[in-house]
Amino acid sequence: MNARISTNPELDAPIPERWPTRLTELLGIRWPLLLGGMMWLSDARLVAAMVRAGGMGFITARSLRTDEDFRQALRECRELTGGQPFGVNLTLSRRASGNDSMPARLRIALDEGVRLFETAGLPPTELMPIFREAKAIVIHKCAHVRHAVSAQNMGVDAVTLVGMEEGGHPGSNQLPTFLNGAYALDQLHIPLALGGGIGHGRQIAAALALGADAVVMGSVFTPALETPAHDAYKQRIVATDAHGTRAVLGSLGDTWRVVDNENARKVAALEAAGARSHAEFGALISGERTQALAYQAGQHEEGMLSMGPAVGFARAVEPVADIVRRLQTECMQASSRFRAMLAST
Ligand SMILES: Cc1cc2nc3c(=O)[nH]c(=O)nc-3n(C[C@H](O)[C@H](O)[C@H](O)COP(=O)(O)O)c2cc1C
């Protein structure tokens, strides 16, 4: 146990070394905190920082241009974690380009010793036999309770269910995270991670009290010190509040929640004018353009900057370990308050 963490005796609570749940046991981590894969951002350094802080992170396989770059990223991550396990995110996009490379990327990850995968987007039907043969752990991320149940039936080890508040691609689901989670718990027997809009420790306490086995976060970590993005982007993110994001492309069945920057407003205008295919949005929705202009060059009004309203909790550029520590502190304070309330009845 660590020292006390609050000056308010009512809320004071020690942070335990571990908060065990079915998912911490499955993944071999200390705290039920997952940093979901983030396209272009979840590189070796960011993922390793999350692992060292006691949670789990996932390198986004699609962010690496070549198989060799991907292999190098995995080796770098293994070195940075000191050999502790880490995960790989395999996103199967609705835009088919890039999906073909996923089986090869999976085999490279297995070859490099990775045994933990976050799948997302389309169901990982074709990858399942490879996972099973390798005895890998698969957490499938989806936005609909019925998709979570299908994934459970398909044999995944755990599911992440995200609500419509999620930064990135929350799908066509309109339910918020906690409603989604409450419905799902009646229908799932495998471990559940809950995500979308979570950026404060009191939400983590609430998710665990609800019955989730972990939470998955993304937006609140985007301006972390270790995130591979330009400082101008990070300053824009810490200045963005809970109302600074918008969902676009819902009319294409491909909802994308992003920072409400100039680029997103152009996309919204085109959509309002009737554009209904990805091709009509051209470079405005190009991932490579977002990477080059916004993440690398710091031109934050360009590109599609995946982000949800949990960004409002990110108020400084700080190391991942400090963000995790804050979340743990807030979570313990919220759970002590709850325990004290129960004890007083
Ligand atoms: C910048 C960014 C990029 C993301 N890219 C991906 C991705 O490539 N694949 C994926 O499965 N999820 C992606 N996500 C979703 C996250 O993995 C996670 O599910 C989500 O951030 C949780 O919701 P929150 O943003 O409200 O915390 C991304 C999220 C963000 C913020």
Image (cartoon, helix red, strand yellow):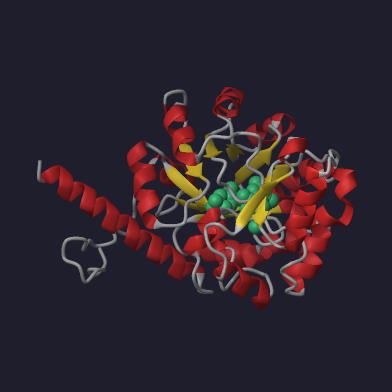
Residue at 74% x, 45% y: name it.
Answer: 107
Residue nearest the observer in this picture, 47 or 147? 147
Residue at 64% x, 52% y: name it.
Answer: 246
Q: Is residue 37 visible?
A: no
- Point out residue 9 in the picture as x, y percentages from the top left corner: 16, 65
Residue nearest the observer in this picture, 206 or 66? 206
- Point out residue 173 in the picture as x, y percentages from the top left corner: 60, 34
- Point out residue 176 in the picture as x, y percentages from the top left corner: 51, 39
Query: What is the total number of numbered labels drawn onto the structure image?
Result: 0
Quadrant of the image containing the C terminus: top left
Quadrant of the image containing the N terminus: bottom left
Asked if 40 appears above or below 339 in the picture, the reply is below
Residue nearest the observer in this picture, 325 or 271? 271
Question: Quarter-wise, where is residue 210 in the image?
Answer: top left
- Point out residue 268 in the picture as x, y percentages from the top left corner: 75, 50
Taking the image as shown, residue 329 lies to the left or right of residue 93, namely: left
Residue sitting farthest toward the left: 344
Residue at 61% x, 25% y: name it.
Answer: 154
Residue at 62% x, 71% y: name it.
Answer: 236
Q: Is residue 197 visible?
A: yes
